[in-house]
Each structure stands twice: as structure tokens, then as C-alpha cells.
């Protein structure tokens, strides 16, 4: 799915894995409009230094195929991969 990237200028955001806080290395990710978890703004953070992705609201590290639920809601689909949702 397409996504829009935003540079982070908030130096308080740190990667939970490598602890970098450089605005050059932390990107905010906005999910594409048609994405099931679309939110008008940043939904997850991505560290360019180590490749870690984590949710904006939950702070949970996201694995490949996982998405931050809109608003961090702990609903039924929270933390489920796309493959799991198809079952």
C-alpha cells in the first residue's frame, strides 16, 4: 500500500531499538487513504538507522505486515497481520 512519509522534527522521539533521536533518522509514516487503518496524520514511526517501525499511539514495535491501529485502539484487529485478517 502507498504511504506518505514525514520527517520528524520532534527531538523527543527516540527509536525503541537503537535509541537514535536524530530528526534525520526518524520518519513519520502516514498510511495511504485507502488503507484500512488510515488516519489523517502520522500513524507509525520508522527509524532509517536500524529499520525499526513502531506505532505512534501504542509504542509497540511493528513486524512486517503489521499496522498501527487507527488511534491505537485495542480492538479485535490490534496487532494482527494482513494474513491473519484474511482467515
Image (cartoon, rainbow, N blue to C red):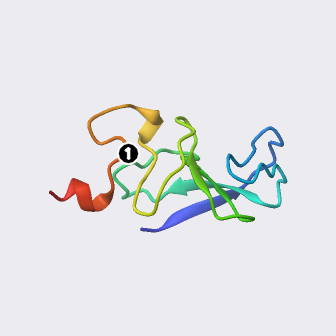
In the rendered image, the vertical position of residue 41 relative to residue 48, given as above or below: above
Q: Which residue is drawn at 32% across and 49% down?
A: 80
Residue at the bottom extreme, as displayed: 2
Horizontal relation, residue 42 to residue 27: left or right: left
In which quadrant of the rendered view does residue 75 lie? top left
In the rendered image, the vertical position of residue 57 relative to residue 1, given as above or below: above
Query: Which of the image's four quarters has the N terminus?
Result: bottom left
Query: Which of the image's four quarters has the C terminus?
Result: bottom left
Q: How many numbered callouts? A: 1
Q: Nearer the viewer, residue 55 or 42?
A: 55
Q: Residue at x 29, y 42 (%)?
A: 77
Assess disc 1: are there few (<14), some (14-19) or many (≥20) residues with their C-alpha within 10 Å of its C-alpha. Answer: some
Q: Which residue is drawn at 68% across and 46% down?
A: 16
Give the x, y percent position of residue 28. Answer: 65, 53
Give the x, y percent position of residue 68. Answer: 46, 46
In the rendered image, the vertical position of residue 34 relative to residue 16, given as above or below: below
Residue at the top extreme, as displayed: 74
In the rendered image, the vertical position of residue 77 relative to residue 74, given as above or below: below
Give the secondary structure at mark 1. Answer: loop
Horizontal relation, residue 35 to residue 54: left or right: left
Residue under label 1: 79
Give the x, y percent position of residue 11. Answer: 84, 43
In which quadrant of the rendered view does residue 50 lie? bottom right
Residue at the front extreme, as displayed: 17
Q: Which residue is drawn at 52% across and 35% down?
A: 58
Give the x, y percent position of residue 81. Answer: 33, 56
Amino acid at each position: 500500500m502507498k504511504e506518505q512519509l514525514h520527517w520528524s522534527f520532534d527531538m523527543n522521539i527516540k527509536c525503541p531499538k537503537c535509541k537514535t533521536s536524530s530528526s534525520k533518522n526518524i520518519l513519520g509514516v502516514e498510511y495511504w487513504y485507502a488503507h484500512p487503518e488510515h488516519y489523517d496524520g502520522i500513524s507509525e514511526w520508522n527509524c532509517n538507522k536500524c529499520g525499526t517501525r513502531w506505532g505512534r499511539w501504542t509504542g509497540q514495535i511493528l513486524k512486517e505486515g503489521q499496522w498501527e491501529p487507527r488511534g491505537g485502539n485495542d480492538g479485535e484487529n490490534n496487532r494482527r497481520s494482513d494474513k491473519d485478517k484474511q482467515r
